[in-house]
Image: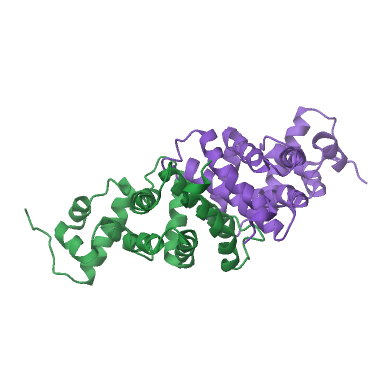
Chain colours: A green, B purple
Amino acid sequence: MARRGRRVGDADTRMQILEAARSAFARVGYDAATIRLIAADAGVDPALIHHYFGNKEDLFAEAVHVPFRPADAILGAFGPGIDGAGERIARLFFTIWDAEPSREAVLGQLRRSLVNPDAPAPFAEFISSALLRRAVGHLRGLHRELRLELMASQLVGLAMVRYVMKIEPVASAPLDELIAHVAPRIQTYLEESFLP
Amino acid sequence: MARRGRRVGDADTRMQILEAARSAFARVGYDAATIRLIAADAGVDPALIHHYFGNKEDLFAEAVHVPFRPADAILGAFGPGIDGAGERIARLFFTIWDAEPSREAVLGQLRRSLVNPDAPAPFAEFISSALLRRAVGHLRGLHRELRLELMASQLVGLAMVRYVMKIEPVASAPLDELIAHVAPRIQTYLEESFLP
């Protein structure tokens, strides 16, 4: 394999990889932007990307400022069991929105989806590939993917109403109060006993 | 009162009023755009607007292609009682999204909110003023406004995931299947027995 362009590991190389990654994710989407493609764009060896960033989902998380590692997030939410998972997920979700850079990344993605519905939607693919697909194994019963995504849609809608549309009283309610209301509802999506 | 500019009631006048209304709602928002202001912009008497369109909420609904009258919608949802209201509301909500012009109006509003967070958000104000505030009287128990809006946020999020972010399996699921899952959850927001 040609090693042209491979550089010593320094901050510039990391930046260069992150820029190539952001550009590739935006251009072709999350699933189609392989480590190999990003490495070629950045002029580095794919192994160097794995060395610096771990796997693709961790690279994406770092590139778009998602403030957690997907695998850790799912383990944190479901590891202690299905009881209370709704609340843990709601809290994790709002750490994204409370962190300025990741909120901007999500809003930027939504803007692009609204302006150009056919453009790649790397954030949506990431949610689907790195989070929902991994969480499925922790649920029991029918329609597990659908239930997980409907649960996610409650959180997306809450963020829209609170941070984008800014409708009161949700816009100004303390986050703990919102979570107290929403957590038991999203919990019903996670449990088998509440199927239609 | 000066009657300069008042015209005979014809299709052109209706169009002129609707255009003035759309422009005023976008410029100053739903609550601040009074019938009097819209009448002045359109060069007609306020009484003519009432005559053609009823009250402000009906004028807004017609101007931005909301395919129902707010008062009728709330009566339809809550008139038969709180039982089943969640499902009736979910179905009504999706008649907005299924109607092309109103979907475009909602998406246009979301686009503007995302691009310019400080711009007036007439659609959000309309939901709050014409729908949520009126629905409150049909609920019992604490936190009624908050619960109603959280219920609405579930629907907003479902629409985002299905129509804007287009994440599977929600994007392609039959609407009846989605409603079967979501209606019992949003119903919990309407009932007193499921308070945190």
Residue B191: x percent and y percent? Answer: 68, 51
Indicate left or right for B1 with B81 as reference.
right
Indicate left or right for B173 with A137 as reference.
right
Indicate left or right for B140 with A87 as reference.
right
> Is any part of residue A175 visible from this angle?
yes
> Is any part of residue B116 visible from this angle?
no
Q: Outermost residue, front direction?
A: A193
Above or below, A67 against B169 in this view is below
- Quarter in which the C terminus of chain B is drawn: bottom right
Frontmost residue, A40 versus B73: B73
Q: Outermost residue, top direction?
A: B10
Q: Outermost residue, left direction?
A: A1
Residue A184: x percent and y percent? Answer: 55, 57
Q: Outermost residue, right direction?
A: B1
Frontmost residue, B108 versus A196: A196
Q: Quadrant of residue B42?
A: top right
Frontmost residue, B32 versus B89: B89
Residue A135: x percent and y percent? Answer: 37, 53
Above or below, A173 against B42 in this view is below
Residue at x-position 37% and y-position 62%: A79
Above or below, A21 against B183 in this view is below
Above or below, B74 against A19 in this view is above
Q: Quadrant of residue B66?
A: top right
Residue B172: x percent and y percent? Answer: 44, 35
Frontmost residue, B1 versus A115: A115
Tag count: 0
